[in-house]
Image: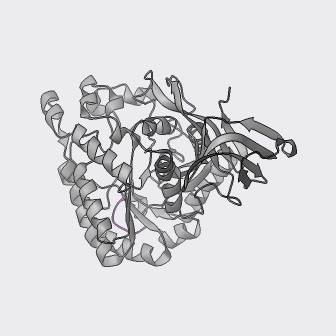
Amino acid sequence: MSLLLKNGSVVSADGVVVADVATSGGLVTEIGAGLDGGQFDEVIDVEQYLVGPGFVDLHVHLREPGQEWKEDIATGSAAAAAGGFTTVVAMPNTDPAIDAGHLARYVTDRGNQAGLCRVMPSGCITMGRQGAKLAHLDDLRSAGVHIFTDDGDTVSDAGVLRRAMMYIAEIGGIVAQHCEDSGLARGGHMHEGSVSSELGITGLPSLAEELVVARDLKLVELTGCRYHVQHVSSAGTVKLIRQAKAGGLPVTCEVAPHHVSLDHSLVETMDGVAKMYPPLRTPDDIAALTEALIDGTIDAVATDHAPHSDVEKDVPFEEAPRGITGLETSASVINGVGLDPVSFFERMSVAPGALTGAELGWLTVGAAADIVVFDPEAAWTPVSFKSKSSNSPWVGKELRGKVKMTLLGGTVTHQEMS
């Protein structure tokens, strides 16, 4: 099928131009003004909307295999398409954990069956995410895994992580770390600060994240392994990453939309939906994270999409599981941060696309027709989701910026055009 998107504000590394985007056979075939619509199967007017490469999410929990009551790969793919995502990286903290090649292939195959976005499996660093014995790294790599992580847990043993880094550096891949010192974080339910003191809830200090990042950066110096900090949440972590990048270390990082938009005061509601991992921190942390996202110290936005059922979240705050859904609201939240259109797509699409190891980048002739059409001015209020779960702090809250259409290989996977 051939499709022509007419009159869009097409975003590239060079800026924004009003142009048409032609697709056929799964590829972008032409970009330019005044293209003849008569030769296409379908022509859609996208005037006044931004047109750019489909969003890429480095950090989603699709819960399959093992926790399909929260989410499965099909429903998570539908949520991703609705949020403008054409590629997502599925975390391996499933049941069983993705620590061998056949399990990674299962995730890929299930994503292909759903056909709504490209689902790329990440693989465990250690067997069963237990932090002791290295996972089947060769087997995972041969199954297409590029990002290795024990997400949900930190690889605490520096010796184990050193061996993993040395080996992953050889086979080609990225170590992505959930940074949290287990001793400092033990028993914590929210950020350790003024609000936790007022509420009498055991806090989880920023230092728990920063200590692990500081240690791991020394191992990066030693091994040369590419290293990615997941869901950065503190100003101190930003400072460490900025210094590491200035020193030439192969370090990247991501931030979740909720960490640049919500602070620990939300926990005063005592609603389980305010319980995050890492926790919501202070307005000063939000300011530092936002600055780093704008100046490029933070490479990518990643949702940390973490669906839970209503029954699980509707319990006393301390008993609630951590995490929120994010795929369908991410672009809208980040739209309010203050990025210009080029930086918006750089953080949402291009930089994370490069970190997947796949050839995902700006819209160019010959590239895959993975495209999102985004209206930065549209106001909307989330009420329901394509995801199985609705544990989102933005339910019933007005957001600005809406995905109007998503294309995967030139096929429309989501559309809200009027």
Q: Which residue is painted at 49% across and 48% down in the image?
A: 348
Rendered position, 151 above or below 215: above
The rendered magenta stretch, by its main secondary structure, is classed as loop
Residue 247 figure quarter:
bottom left
* Residue 159 point in image, percent of width and height: 28, 72
Q: Is residue 385 among what the camera can see?
A: yes
133 in magenta: yes
186 to the left or right of 92: left
* Residue 173 point in image, percent of width and height: 47, 69
Using the image as rendered, state which of residue 28 and residue 165 is in the foreground: 28
Q: Quadrant of the C terminus?
A: top right
Q: Which residue is painted at 66% across and 35% down in the image?
A: 47
Q: Which residue is painted at 52% across and 61% down in the image?
A: 354
Residue 29 figure quarter:
bottom right
Residue stretch in magenta: 130-134
* Residue 208 point in image, percent of width and height: 21, 52
Using the image as rendered, state which of residue 340 and residue 158 is in the foreground: 340
Q: How many marks?
A: 0
158 in magenta: no
Residue 193 figure quarter:
top left
